[in-house]
Image (cartoon, coloured by chain):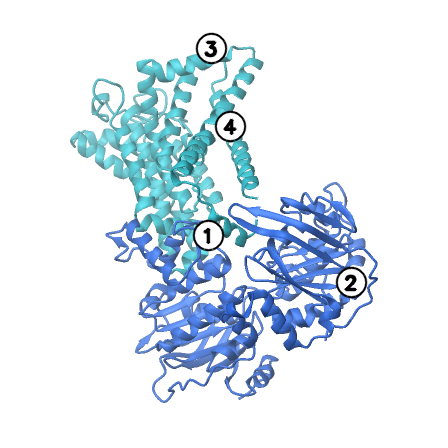
Chain colours: A cyan, B blue
């Protein structure tokens, strides 16, 4: 429809703000829940085609991922790295920068922290070790994004390609580091020295959940606040939405680009540090959870919203943890969880499209 | 006078709409509109924004469906369900903005849109293009990259594309708003040639002069209704003055409601700025000294541009589009580095300062690309009003956005500048062009402004908003601001400016005092002749 007609519509379309607010909330909920339901349904059909019982599978997923105490604790623990990566991605994506190199940034930070922590703990108190490791993780992540940031800011090189390439390099380099300089000779499998369990991040109450989860939640909320309530966040959004307008408005695009890369990769690196200090205490050779590529669709599902992403990450963590044990029990491939995520994205797109069509026809 | 082409009176109209009603929530965009569009006739649709022209075009182009009423093509009642169907029915539409692929060649653009399985027949296409070139009397290099053509030429390609599959009806939606005077004349010739071939042309414009010059028949829309129709026979018997009076009466209702718009309409292009005595004995406020700037491919290199602007003076920059006007504006605003030369504002040397620093010293730039770079389309009106002030008090405090104050500021500006928007939170891209321009004007107007650069300030605006924008420019100059107006419309410059410089190929060819006969001297300069 034309701009002028559109405007007239907006001027005159009223009809009770409260009722339309309700309707908006309902349609928003539907837009999120409908794809989830459809994805679960389509997933069920696939399981059926594999000759398994979908209900049993889902029951296991819910049972092991959500309802059993150990499973639920594992789920919550898993959200920590995912949330920190999500926070990093939200900063970047909102600023229009597609940092797809999170896996490399995450892994390198994890390896450096895994090597650093056992050395530091010998002569430093735990809190200081943890703090230094957080800083180191964030710095390593940020440094690994420096080259893409420079190429983007100075030469306009597409960051999708450079960050992905740096990610492959980072994953390889992390492996080299684990196998050669950081290798702990006392173990048979190449891996870094192990941080004793007692020196890792404190547990919350009597659970296996570590304090990194709280940190991750706080960081995600802070990032959300930063993007929506601060001048810096608004500047990032302007650059992301229309770089030419940002230039016209006199924003320092080069500086903002570097800041975006540093923040995004830094938060991802922090995620790596939290995962090592909270869960593993060491990095084995060839370990690469590849969380980054899993989180990217979730961030899109949440429309770059820091609060909504918490729900999606939790949902996904349930699927991951529950899916792992369900896969073992039922002999469904463990990557079936990824199939569910893919289905979810597809149905999200379909529902989005239908909603768009519906709104168009309503306006016309 | 429009020449009378031979048309068979008994023939059915190429396209006819009968009793079309189209409602949008809360607004009646088309209120029982009935019109016949004859073969071999240039039919002008006149009307303000919101009169329902665009809706009618949308229906004919297959983009919208009427709520009731019928569309006939060659006498047959037809429902046009999609733009593709519209094309298949022989209705080609050229929209205000060029919708071609800039990186493809002319021929490639024309060959687009066939079924995916069919081979692209270059020879056939080339032959067809030659026929069209001959018919239209235009010369277009088939292998030129489209983005490198002038806007006028791009539009000619659009017209050819619209008629590529044997179209017999051509709809032109405000085609002249981005053309130079020469481009407009050329378009007129193309339209006449097509008309003489029997094509029915529907020509939408805001400009009465064009309506009179090109139209065989004029229909006037107001508030969704056809309020007047000047058929060919009647039009032929009227003088330009008669037509003007009649159209104004129809467009704006009875004399009692004749507003400034009507006056602007009558006087448009005939008014010269009354010689406001600008005191040029003192020091100029803004000095541009031999400024040169480099350019990327497709842009114009600025070389040694020099002029001064005194407080309260309106300095115009004329020239055919793409001769360095945009690059000059960017160099003044700080968006383009100055390679050599100096920019001085009062006591401050701006040459090496950034955009923000220049703004703080009082430099303002109202860009011609309102959505491209002037605003962030997906963000609210409120944000866009302050996009150049992000982080500064009182709307930000220690880096935190004070949304309440930001919105209050926006509501205040919306009222002062009469910006028509549902709310300050509406994404700005939803506003009409005139209202987006008001947002830009509101953003740049402040007591700290000392130099304001307006780049094509009324481009694409309707009469009412054109008048408002021009009044705004004169008012800001009257308050002592050194004002620079860049425009491709000579009428606009002679109406607003004290002095006018002409740009051609990145150079300022000369500066003319805006007195009797200025147009002549400007015309000479615009053709590229160097003058003292």
Secondary structure beneath disc 2? loop
Residue B318, given in percent of the width and then of the height, sits at 53, 76
Q: Which residue is mark 3?
A: A56
Mark 3 residue crowding within 10 angstroms, few (<14) / some (14–19) / many (20+): few
Relative to residue B243, is residue A6 depicted above or below?
Answer: above
Dots 1, 2 in contact, CB < 8 A: no
Mark 1 residue crowding within 10 angstroms, few (<14) / some (14–19) / many (20+): many
Residue positioned 43% across, 51% down in the render: B422
> Is A336 in front, or is B407?
B407
Which chain letter goes with mark 3? A
Residue B491, given in percent of the width and then of the height, sits at 55, 76
Secondary structure beneath disc 3? helix
Relative to residue A65, is residue A142 depicted above or below?
Answer: below
- The Cα–Cα distance between marks 4 and 1, rounded to whole angstroms, is 31 Å
- The Cα–Cα distance between marks 1 and 3, rounded to whole angstroms, is 49 Å
Quarter of the image where one finds residue B386 = bottom left
Which chain letter goes with mark 2? B
Q: Which residue is mark 4?
A: A342
Which chain letter goes with mark 4? A
């Amino acid at each position: 429809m034309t701009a002028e007609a559109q405007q007239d519509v907006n001027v005159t379309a009223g009809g009770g703000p409260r009722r339309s607010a309700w309707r908006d909330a309902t349609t928003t909920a539907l837009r999120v829940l409908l794809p989830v339901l459809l994805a679960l349904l389509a997933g069920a059909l696939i399981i059926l085609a594999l000759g398994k019982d979908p209900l049993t599978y889902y029951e296991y997923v819910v049972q092991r991922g959500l309802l059993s105490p150990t499973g639920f604790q594992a789920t919550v623990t898993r959200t920590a790295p995912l949330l920190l990566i999500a926070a990093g991605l939200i900063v970047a994506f909102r600023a229009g920068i597609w940092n797809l190199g999170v896996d490399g940034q995450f892994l390198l930070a994890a390896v450096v922290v895994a090597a650093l922590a056992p050395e530091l703990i010998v002569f430093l108190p735990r809190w200081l070790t943890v703090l230094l490791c957080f800083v180191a993780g964030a710095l390593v992540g940020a440094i690994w994004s420096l080259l893409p940031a420079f190429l983007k800011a100075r030469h306009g090189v597409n960051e999708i390609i450079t960050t992905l390439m740096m990610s492959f390099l980072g994953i390889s380099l992390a492996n080299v580091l684990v196998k050669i300089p950081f290798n702990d000779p006392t173990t048979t499998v190449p891996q870094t020295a192990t941080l004793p369990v007692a020196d890792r991040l404190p547990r919350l109450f009597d659970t296996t959940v570590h304090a990194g989860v709280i940190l991750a939640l706080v960081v995600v909320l802070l990032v959300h606040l930063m993007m929506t309530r601060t001048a810096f966040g608004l500047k990032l959004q302007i650059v992301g939405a229309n770089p030419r307008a940002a230039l016209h408005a006199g924003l320092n695009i080069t500086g903002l680009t570097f800041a975006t890369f540093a923040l995004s990769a830094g938060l991802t690196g922090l995620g790596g540090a939290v995962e090592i200090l909270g869960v593993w205490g060491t990095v084995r050779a060839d370990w690469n959870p590849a969380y980054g590529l899993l989180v990217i669709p979730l961030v899109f599902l949440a429309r770059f919203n820091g609060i909504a992403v918490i729900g999606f990450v939790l949902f996904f963590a349930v699927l991951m943890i529950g899916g792992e044990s369900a896969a073992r029990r039922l002999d469904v491939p463990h990557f079936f969880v990824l199939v569910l995520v893919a289905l979810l994205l597809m149905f999200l797109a379909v529902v989005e499209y239908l909603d768009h069509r519906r709104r168009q026809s309503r306006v016309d | 006078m429009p020449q009378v082409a031979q048309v068979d009176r008994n023939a059915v109209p190429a396209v006819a709409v009968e009793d079309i009603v189209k409602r949008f929530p809360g607004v009646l965009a088309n209120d029982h509109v009935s019109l016949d569009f004859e073969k071999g006739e240039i039919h002008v649709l006149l009307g303000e924004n919101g009169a329902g022209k665009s809706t009618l075009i949308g229906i004919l182009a297959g983009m919208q469906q009427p709520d009731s009423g019928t569309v006939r093509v060659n006498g047959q009642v037809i429902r046009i369900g999609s733009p593709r169907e519209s094309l298949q029915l022989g209705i080609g539409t050229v929209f205000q903005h060029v919708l071609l692929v800039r990186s493809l060649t002319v021929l490639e653009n024309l060959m687009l849109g066939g079924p995916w399985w069919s081979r692209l027949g270059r020879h056939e296409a080339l032959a067809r293009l030659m026929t069209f070139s001959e018919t239209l009397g235009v010369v277009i290099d088939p292998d030129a990259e489209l983005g490198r053509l002038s806007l006028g030429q791009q539009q000619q390609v659009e017209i050819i594309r619209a008629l590529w599959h044997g179209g017999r009806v051509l709809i032109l939606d405000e085609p002249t708003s981005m053309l130079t005077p020469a481009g407009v004349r050329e378009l007129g010739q193309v339209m006449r040639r097509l008309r003489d071939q029997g094509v029915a042309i529907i020509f939408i414009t805001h400009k009465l002069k064009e309506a009179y010059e090109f139209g065989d028949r004029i229909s006037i829309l107001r508030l969704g209704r056809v309020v007047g129709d000047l058929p060919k026979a009647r039009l032929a018997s009227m003088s330009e003055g008669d037509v003007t009076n009649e159209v104004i009466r129809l467009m704006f209702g009875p004399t009692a409601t004749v507003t400034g718009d009507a006056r602007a309409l009558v006087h448009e292009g005939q008014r010269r700025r009354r010689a406001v005595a600008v005191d040029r004995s003192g020091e100029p406020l803004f000095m541009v000294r031999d400024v040169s700037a480099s350019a990327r491919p497709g842009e114009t290199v600025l070389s040694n541009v020099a002029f001064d602007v005194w407080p309260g003076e309106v300095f115009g920059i004329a020239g055919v589009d793409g001769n360095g006007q945009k690059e000059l504006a960017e160099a003044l605003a700080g968006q383009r580095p100055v390679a050599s030369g100096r920019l001085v504002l009062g006591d401050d040397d701006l040459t090496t300062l950034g955009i923000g620093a220049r703004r703080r010293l009082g430099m303002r730039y109202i860009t011609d690309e309102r959505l491209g770079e002037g605003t962030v389309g997906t963000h609210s009106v409120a944000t866009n009003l302050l996009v150049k002030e992000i982080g500064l008090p009182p709307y930000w405090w220690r880096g935190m956005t004070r949304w309440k104050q930001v919105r209050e500021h926006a509501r205040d500006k919306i009222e002062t500048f009469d910006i028509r928007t549902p709310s300050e939170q509406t994404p700005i891209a939803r506003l009409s062009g005139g209202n987006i321009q008001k947002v830009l004007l509101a953003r740049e107007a402040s007591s700290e402004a000392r130099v304001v650069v307006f780049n094509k300030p009324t481009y694409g605006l309707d009469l009412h908003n054109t008048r408002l924008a021009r009044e705004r420019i004169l008012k800001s100059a009257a308050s002592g601001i050194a004002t620079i107006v860049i425009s491709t419309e000579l009428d606009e410059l002679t109406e607003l400016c004290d002095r006018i410089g002409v740009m051609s190929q990145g150079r300022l060819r000369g500066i003319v005092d805006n007195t009797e006969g200025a147009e002549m001297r400007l015309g000479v300069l615009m053709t590229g002749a160097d003058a003292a």
